[in-house]
Amino acid sequence: MNYQLNEGSIVVADTLTDRTMHVLAPKPGSADFTVLISHDELEPEEAYLDFIDRQLNDLARQVNKFQQGPRGKAVLGAPKNGIEGVLLSIHYKQQGKFVYHQQAVFPFPDERHLLTFTASLPMPFGEQHLNQFHQMLSSFTPRR
């Protein structure tokens, strides 16, 4: 498999799968959120929504005061022809501090692989941060 990364590409065995994580951190002094972009693969016979439930249940067991808001719809890319996914709003207490997440999970590039975007803040998301997160998702352009 020819594996692409920002800086170039490498050839790796077909038995390897992409589980990379990209972390985009705010510049010092800014009030922006941190963004984590991760790749996952469904377990054999696992459905997309079952994966989300499994991941949330695992997280809930590892942290305190786990809370999940209602699930919504997310779109990756331009709204007309974007990829539909699931939007999650969660928060929990970890190491004595609350952490707030907006998370969008998309089947990409096929139904067995998932691309997840997680925005994190130490405070609840306000309108400006929510808009910024959705604008980031809508700006997605797949590599050809």
Image (cartoon, grey):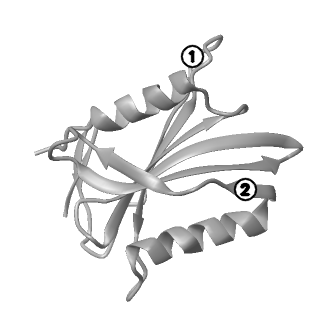
Q: Nearer the viewer, residue 127 or 134?
A: 127
Q: Nearer the viewer, residue 19 or 140?
A: 140
Residue furthest toward the left? 144
Residue furthest toward the bottom? 45
SS at badge 2: strand
Q: Position of residue 127 (x, y in %)?
A: 54, 25
Left/right of residue 6 with respect to residue 143 in the rendered view: right
SS at badge 1: loop
Q: Position of residue 122 (x, y in %)?
A: 72, 32
Q: Amino acid at mark 1?
A: Lys
Q: Amino acid at mark 2?
A: Gln
User: In which quadrant of the rendered view does residue 125 lie?
Assistant: top right
Give me the residue at 42% from left, 83% from top.
46
Residue designated by label 2: 67
User: In which quadrant of the rendered view does residue 76 lie?
Assistant: top left
Give me the residue at 86% from left, 46% from top.
95
The vertical placement of 78 against 41, above or below, is above
Q: Is the C terminus in the top left, top right, bottom left or bottom right quadrant? A: top left
Q: Position of residue 52 (x, y in %)?
A: 51, 68
N-terminal-most mark, 1 or 2: 1
Give me the residue at 24% from left, 52% from top.
83
Residue furthest toward the top? 29
User: In the image, which disc is placed on residue 71?
Assistant: none
Left/right of residue 18 with respect to residue 25 in the rendered view: left
Could you tell me how far apart the alpha carbons at marks 1 and 2 are, in whole angstroms?
28 Å
Q: Is the N terminus in the top left, top right, bottom left or bottom right quadrant? A: bottom left
Residue designated by label 1: 27
